[in-house]
Amino acid sequence: MISGTSKNKTAGENGLQETSLTDRDYEFLCHLIYERSRIHLGPDKRVLVTSRLAKRLRHHGLDGYADYCELLRSPQGEEELQFLIDRISTNHTHFFRELKHFDFLRETVIPQWQADRRRTEPYRIWSSASSTGEEAYSIAVHLSEHFAPADSGRWQIEGTDISTRVLEVARRGVYEADRLDGVSPELVRRYFQKGMNQWAGHLRVKDEVRRRVNFQHLNLLEGNYPYAQPFDLIFCRNVMIYFDRPTQETLVRLLAEKLRPACHLFVGHSESLSGVKHSLKLVRPAIYLKPA
């Protein structure tokens, strides 16, 4: 034991003993997570941190969170820090989340792209916080539905996330079938394969869709994005709610720099850029336009 404070234990679920997270250790974890990811964890996130890291303590055979903090401070802590950020940054998502964005894509954006026959390079879409891939694949399915097969080369999608763990799921493109509840059976039939035997109850995104999406690890706050060409559409949804105001302003500025003029940034409907300094114009709730 490194700190006697870690001996304070309470009965957890199923009668298991769980160590308490002291103020000192929680402040250390919050500072470290903010320093590396700019995710701001307030007092209300303490239970979330405790629940998501309890299994990790058992994995390492640690007696308490003070020991875990010491591990993060050690030379071996860098690898563990990536796991910590993976666990804290993981968010629930599902296919075709926030449908009004897809309505706008269908009604406004896609007709403009289809009408512009002079353009030779593909339209580029960035799912900048793609999590386990549902958002990026939803976009790919939506575009596949509205572009003729002969025009399939007219668009491409980049998906990024700070969590390496969720990116592994995204690249596989395999999901439990109930993750597509609410999606039209016809879309499921056209763009997903049913799992057999040990994969019964699962669906896999078909190869022709998965090939259109490239996933890679990226911390949005580090800048120097690995993209030489700007994007025609950027999704950055349900991310900024975890950041403080200065970080939000930095992120919007970085994203706007990678957005073509007269193109759109989508944020989450629970988010707002009100009070955030930026150069974009609000055109619909949670939809912003970069002026030409």
Image (spheres, rainbow, N blue to C red):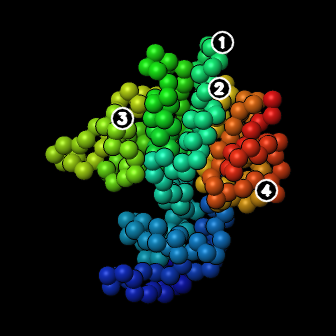
Q: Is residue 147 found left or right of 209 in the rendered image?
A: right
Left or right of 208 in this view: 280: right
Label number found at residue 118: 1
Does residue 199 sit above or below 274 in this rendering? above
Q: Is label 1 in a helix, a strand or a loop?
A: loop
Q: Are marks 1 and 2 in contact (CB under 8 Å)?
A: no
Residue located at (33% from left, 85% from top): 15
**Disc with the residue nearer the chain's start (1 vs 2):** 2
Whole-angstrom CA distance, mark 4 to mark 1, is: 36 Å
| SS type, badge 3 | helix
Q: Is residue 249 left or right of residue 142?
A: right
Q: Which residue is mark 4?
A: 274
Determine if residue 228 is in view.
Answer: no
Camera-near label (4 vs 1) is 1
Q: Which residue is mark 3?
A: 191
Image position, residue 158 (x, y; %): 55, 33
In the rendered image, residue 165, in percent from the top left (x then y), is placed at 44, 49
Mark 2, residue position: 112
What amino acid is at disc 1? Arg
Q: In the image, what residue occupies the spot 32% across and 81% down?
A: 14
Q: Disc 4 marks which amino acid?
A: Ser
Mark 3 surroundings: few (<14), some (14-19) or many (≥20) residues within 10 A: many
Q: Label 3 to label 2, Cα distance in Å? A: 25 Å
Pair 4/2: label in front = 2
- Tell me which residue sits at (38%, 49%) in the image: 180
Amino acid type shown at disc 2: Gln
Residue 1: assigned label? none
Instruction: For the residues labelled 1 and 3, say whether their Cβ atoms are less than 8 Å apart.
Output: no
Camera-side residue: 257 or 138? 138
The amino acid type, in three-letter code, at marker 3 is Tyr
